[in-house]
């Protein structure tokens, strides 16, 4: 018997080890001081820790809840190739009627068109000839517009620095945004409603870049406080610089002169580097560009905010921007770098000139045949400017910038007339498609209006956590006490399984990077009550078998066998209900459904597997005539 239980012991041990591993970051984070968090943030380790903890939702952490609605009537108006009062009156009437009667705008608009007898093909000839074709095309444009707005908002919120924001569609034309931990409502509103900006900047050449870096070093050097701060922020050593193969800025730009005075010793300490070259000391050479190591990003951004740096860049009419993502310079190397670009202060073009951005495979006969490319088409104004810019800067690089992040900086090969150009060099077609979406998202295709806004204070969230925790503990204690009194020794086994259940649910939430909300806590409380239900069914079946005169071992086996079908039937229906809630619910409902689903699923495992293992181990080496149940 003991040998047959060994696999069960192994399974339980592995699951317990995994649960402890999954919950350890959350435990450490919740008990971490603010000073420790700042230290980890400086070294870049805090983000890794936060990615493994149970996140708190808006209702627990506080923040902003905003519902945005896209102005679809304005979009329909903007899509018309010809505008007149007749069309505008139909659009405005449809807007008023649909909002007042809570109807779909396109249904009302189509009804108005039929009643008025207007020919839409005159205004939307590029979308088809018949009314049905045009209405279908306008609906598709509205859906595409919402998806583009979602992309824009995600980019902006990521830049805003919100941890785990929730941005999702609600219905056809609304977007729900939850910004946990944000209390600056004015800044958040400006962030969400302003138009995302796509810009094309010329990249300054090596000589100019080298000169401005030297100016920045001269403006900052000799500041012992700054050197000490940079040393603390970067945690760099000479050994790490040697190990990661990083190169000095002078090597990067091919400059034979050294930044540090020749009398300085060859083996400089970190203090010496940041005293003599505070700015360039943070830079590393990566293929084709200069870069900032991921762990030094925090220190670099703080350096850019200094008055001396801002003043120098203003006088030089330039700016430093980073790539959107970090990358490993050496395959499988742990170090990752952001590419750093020194750009002109003013853009040559903005995203308003892009009429079309399409991802495809390069055509045959070209240098990019069969390779993923993004084709751009510009309006007449953009075409003229693009032709002038590319003609005057052949051989130079031009950066494609969205929301102050450089997505790509290709070289200009030749003058490009006609407003059409092609971007290549993608790893796969999906990457090209992503950039095409970003380029199309250069400007909001339709205005968005805030129709609902709620601010949850952090104190309210703290109260919710306190009360929710108290409710869980009171509910847990009540159930544990009842099981002990009513089922005696068997109740102890059930109590152990219940604690296991809660532990595993929290471990699953941490592993899935799920967000715990107030309804999620309610789901956890409900799980406490429902998870004991399976044990009650099993124990009552065992009692029936004992009353029939069976031995404790036989009663346990029969009780579990008879109860299994009932347990599965009862819990599967709840699982299905939770899946439906998750599929069709939004926000808080999804939080409740997530906890309920995993709580019920795990309760079946603990009730059927863990408790039976305990009972089998208890009776395996004993000759029992009675069972405490």
Image (cartoon, rainbow, N blue to C red):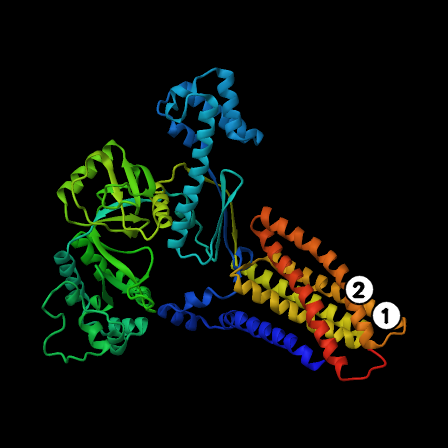
Residue 71 in view, yes or no: no
Residue 133's place in the image compared with 353, above or below, is above
Q: Position of residue 235 (x, y in %)?
A: 31, 74
Q: Which residue is mark 2?
A: 562
Q: Could you tell which of marks 2 and 1 lies nearer the N-terminus? A: 1
Residue 46's place in the image compared with 138, above or below, is below
Q: Residue furthest top?
A: 117
Q: Which residue is mark 1?
A: 545
At 19% from the left and 78% from the top, the residue drawn is: 268
Q: Quadrant of residue 341?
A: bottom left
Which of the pair 460/362 is nearer the observer?
Answer: 362
Q: Position of residue 31 (x, y in %)?
A: 51, 73
Which of the pair 627/294 is nearer the observer?
Answer: 627
Which of the pair 529/605 is nearer the observer?
Answer: 605
- Left or right: residue 353 versus residue 392 is right
Please tell me how crowded label 1 is: few (under 14), some (14-19), or many (20+) other residues with Cα within 10 Å: some
Viewport quadrant of the N terminus: bottom right
Residue 381's place in the image compared with 2, above or below, is above
At 65% from the left and 64% from the top, the residue drawn is: 602
Please tell me how crowded label 2 is: few (under 14), some (14-19), or many (20+) other residues with Cα within 10 Å: some
Q: Please, what secondary structure does the residue beneath circle 1 have?
A: helix
Cα gap from disc 2 to disc 1, whole angstroms:
10 Å
């Amino acid at each position: 018997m003991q040998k047959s239980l060994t696999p069960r012991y192994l399974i339980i041990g592995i699951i317990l080890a995994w649960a402890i591993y999954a919950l350890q970051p959350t435990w450490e984070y919740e008990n971490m001081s603010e000073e420790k968090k700042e230290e980890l943030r400086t070294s870049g380790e805090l983000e890794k820790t936060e990615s493994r903890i149970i996140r708190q939702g808006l209702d627990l952490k506080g923040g902003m809840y905003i519902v945005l609605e896209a102005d679809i009537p304005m979009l329909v108006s903007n899509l018309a190739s010809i505008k007149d009062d007749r069309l505008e009156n139909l659009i405005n009437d449809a807007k008023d009627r649909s909002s007042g009667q809570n109807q779909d705008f396109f249904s009302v608009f189509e009804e108005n068109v039929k009643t008025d007898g207007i020919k839409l093909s005159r205004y939307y000839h590029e979308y088809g000839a018949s009314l049905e074709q045009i209405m279908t095309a306008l609906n598709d444009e509205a859906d595409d517009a919402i998806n583009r707005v979602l992309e824009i908002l995600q980019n902006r919120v990521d830049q805003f620095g919100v941890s785990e924001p929730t941005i999702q569609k609600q219905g056809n034309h609304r977007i729900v945004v939850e910004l946990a931990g944000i209390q600056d409502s004015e800044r958040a509103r400006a962030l969400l409603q302003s138009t995302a900006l796509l810009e094309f900047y010329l990249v300054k050449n090596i000589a100019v870049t080298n000169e401005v870096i030297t100016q920045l070093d001269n403006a900052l050097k000799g500041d012992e406080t700054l050197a000490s701060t940079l040393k603390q922020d970067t945690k760099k050593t000479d050994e790490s610089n040697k190990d990661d193969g990083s190169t000095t800025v002078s090597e990067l730009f091919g400059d034979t002169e050294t930044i540090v005075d020749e009398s300085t010793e060859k083996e400089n300490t970190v203090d010496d580097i940041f005293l003599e070259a505070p700015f360039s000391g943070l830079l590393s050479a990566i293929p084709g560009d200069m870069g900032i190591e991921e762990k030094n990003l925090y220190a670099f951004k703080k350096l850019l905010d200094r008055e001396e740096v801002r003043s120098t860049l203003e006088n030089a009419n330039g700016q430093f921007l980073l790539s959107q993502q970090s990358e490993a310079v050496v395959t499988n190397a742990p170090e990752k770098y952001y590419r750093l670009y020194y750009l002109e202060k003013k853009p040559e073009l903005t995203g308003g000139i892009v009429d079309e951005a399409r991802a495809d495979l390069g055509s045959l006969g070209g240098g990019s045949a069969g390779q993923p490319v993004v084709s751009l088409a510009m309006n007449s104004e953009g075409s003229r400017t693009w032709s002038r810019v590319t003609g005057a800067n052949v051989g130079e690089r031009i950066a494609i910038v969205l929301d102050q992040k450089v997505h790509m900086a290709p070289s200009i090969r030749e003058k490009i007339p006609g407003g059409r150009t092609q971007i290549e060099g993608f790893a796969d077609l999906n990457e090209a498609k992503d950039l095409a979406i970003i380029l199309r998202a250069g400007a909001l295709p339709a205005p968005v209006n805030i129709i609902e806004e709620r601010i949850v204070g952090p104190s309210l969230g703290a109260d919710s956590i306190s009360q929710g925790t108290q409710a869980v503990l009171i509910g847990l204690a009540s159930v544990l006490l009842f099981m002990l009194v009513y089922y005696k020794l068997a109740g102890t086994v059930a109590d152990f399984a219940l604690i296991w259940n809660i532990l595993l649910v929290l471990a699953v939430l941490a592993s899935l990077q799920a967000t715990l909300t107030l309804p999620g806590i309610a789901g956890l409380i409900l799980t406490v009550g429902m998870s004991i239900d399976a044990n009650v069914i099993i124990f009552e079946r065992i009692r029936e078998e004992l009353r029939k005169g069976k031995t404790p071992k036989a009663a346990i086996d029969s009780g579990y066998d008879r109860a299994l079908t009932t347990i599965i039937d009862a819990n599967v229906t709840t699982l299905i209900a939770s899946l439906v809630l998750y599929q069709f619910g939004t926000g808080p409902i999804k939080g409740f459904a997530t906890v309920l689903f995993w709580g019920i699923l795990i309760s079946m495992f603990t009730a059927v597997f863990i408790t039976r293992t305990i009972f089998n181990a208890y009776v395996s080496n004993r000759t029992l005539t009675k069972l405490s149940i």
